[in-house]
C-alpha cells in the first residue's frame, strides 16, 4: 500500500512507514540532543548546545519553539571561511554572532523566523553563536568582543 503526500509543487507516493517517518521528522529532530558546554562573554554565562558535524550544523535550532534566556547554539566549522546562516524551519527570531579563530566577534546579524535569506560573516569565521534575537544588543556585546570557552 502506498500513501500520497501532496505539496503545492509535487505529489509523492510513499509506503505508510515512510510517511509516518516524514510526518514525525520535526518531532524527531527536536528530540535529538546536542552536547552542551558553557561559554562566557564578559560576565555573561551562556549554556550553549554545540553543533560540530555537517548534520548537526544543518539541523541547528530548527523546529524549536523556545530557547532559554541565556541559552544558544554554537556552530563550529571545520576551518575558518565564508560562513552564512539561514532560518529554514526555525521558528524563533535569533541573533547570530560570527566569531573568528581568535574568539572575537566579527559581526552580529538579526534573523527572522522561517526566512531563507542568508546572513553572512563579514570576513572568514570559525564559529557562529545563535541566541534569542536582541540578546547581544541588550548586553551591549559588539564586534570585537571576546567569546571564551569555544569548542576546539
Image (cartoon, grey):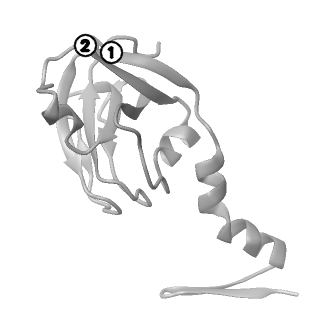
In percent of width and height, residue 131 lies at: 32, 38
Above or below — where is 43 with respect to 139?
Answer: above
Above or below — where is 116 with respect to 98?
Answer: below
Mark 1 touches mark 2? (CB < 8 Å): yes
SS at mark 1 in the image: strand
- Mark 1 Cα shell of 10 Å, populated few (<14), some (14-19), many (≥20): some
Q: Nearer the viewer, residue 1 or 43?
A: 43
In percent of width and height, residue 134 lies at: 19, 42
Q: CA distance from mark 1 to mark 2?
A: 7 Å
> What label does residue 40 carry, if any?
1
In front: label 1 or label 2: 2
- Whether residue 149 is visible, yes or no, is yes
> Does residue 139 appear to the left or right of 148 in the view shown?
left
> Does residue 66 appear to the left or right of 85 in the view shown?
right
- Whether residue 77 is visible, yes or no, is no
Mark 2, residue position: 43
Task: Single out the residue that lies furthest toward the right.
Answer: 1
Amino acid at each position: 500500500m502506498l500513501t500520497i503526500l501532496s505539496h503545492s509543487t509535487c505529489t509523492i507516493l510513499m509506503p505508510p512507514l515512510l510517511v509516518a517517518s516524514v510526518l514525525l521528522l520535526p518531532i524527531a529532530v527536536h528530540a535529538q540532543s546536542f552536547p552542551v558546554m558553557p561559554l562566557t562573554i564578559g560576565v555573561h554565562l551562556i549554556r550553549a548546545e554545540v553543533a560540530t558535524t555537517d548534520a548537526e550544523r544543518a539541523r541547528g535550532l530548527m523546529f524549536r519553539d523556545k530557547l532559554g534566556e541565556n541559552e544558544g547554539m554554537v556552530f563550529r566549522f571545520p576551518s575558518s571561511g565564508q560562513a552564512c546562516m539561514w532560518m529554514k524551519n526555525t521558528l524563533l527570531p535569533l541573533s547570530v554572532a560570527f566569531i573568528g579563530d581568535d574568539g572575537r566577534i566579527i559581526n552580529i546579524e538579526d534573523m527572522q523566523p522561517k526566512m531563507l535569506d542568508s546572513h553572512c560573516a563579514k570576513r572568514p569565521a570559525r564559529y557562529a553563536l545563535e541566541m534569542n534575537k536582541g540578546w547581544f544588543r541588550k548586553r551591549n556585546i559588539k564586534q570585537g568582543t571576546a567569546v571564551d570557552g569555544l569548542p576546539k
